[in-house]
Image (cartoon, grey):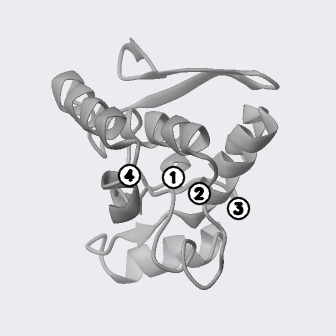
Amino acid sequence: FDTNRDLLESWIKESEGKAKTFDFGLRYKLKDAIHQDDYSHIMDTFFGPMIWYATDSSVSFLDNHDTAGLLKDRFGTDDQIAMGYVFILTHPGVPCVFWQDWFGSNQRTIRDLIALRQRAGITAHSSWKVEAATKGLYAGYVGDSLA
């Protein structure tokens, strides 16, 4: 559940880049961004998303057995979950789809986004540039394409 950049970078370095880790920083910041309609949250480069500094080690996700289980901290409504998948499946990182979402009402959306990711050639190593991340607006490029 850690979001501390120094700790995560140290752990990745000690594994010689072989380890992947769940990007809790992205999960927390993206959840806040979507719930508050304020995308400036994802611009935090220290306690924020690992996709700022370790995209190939960042396992992006919205929920897991802990957040959806005992912690009772689901990502949000079906619409908010769909918005979250739009982000993690169109951006660098190693996206992970939570099984409850895969078998839930967003399955078609998730399938379409996975297909789009594959067609666009988006990978953990894709470049990423944010043009705007403010209240009510997110615009960025992944590779040469508008995300």
The single residue placed furthest to the front in the displayed view is 105
What's the amino acid at mark 3? Phe
What residue is drawn where x is 75% and y is 43%? 35
Say which quadrant the N terminus sits in: bottom right
Sooner in the amino-acid sequence: mark 2 or mark 1: 2
Give the Cα distance between marks 2 and 1.
15 Å
Give the Cα distance between marks 3 and 1.
11 Å
Crowdedness of circle 3 by 10 Å Cα count: few (<14), some, many (20+)? some
Quadrant of residue 43 within the rendered picture: top right
Image check: 22 left or right of 44? left
Determine the secondary structure under disc 2. helix
Determine the secondary structure under disc 3. loop
Determine the secondary structure under disc 4. loop
Residue identifier under label 4: 104
Check residue 47 in the rendering and tell me which mark sits there, or answer none.
3
Residue identifier under label 2: 27
Check residue 79 in the rendering and tell me which mark sits there, or answer none.
none
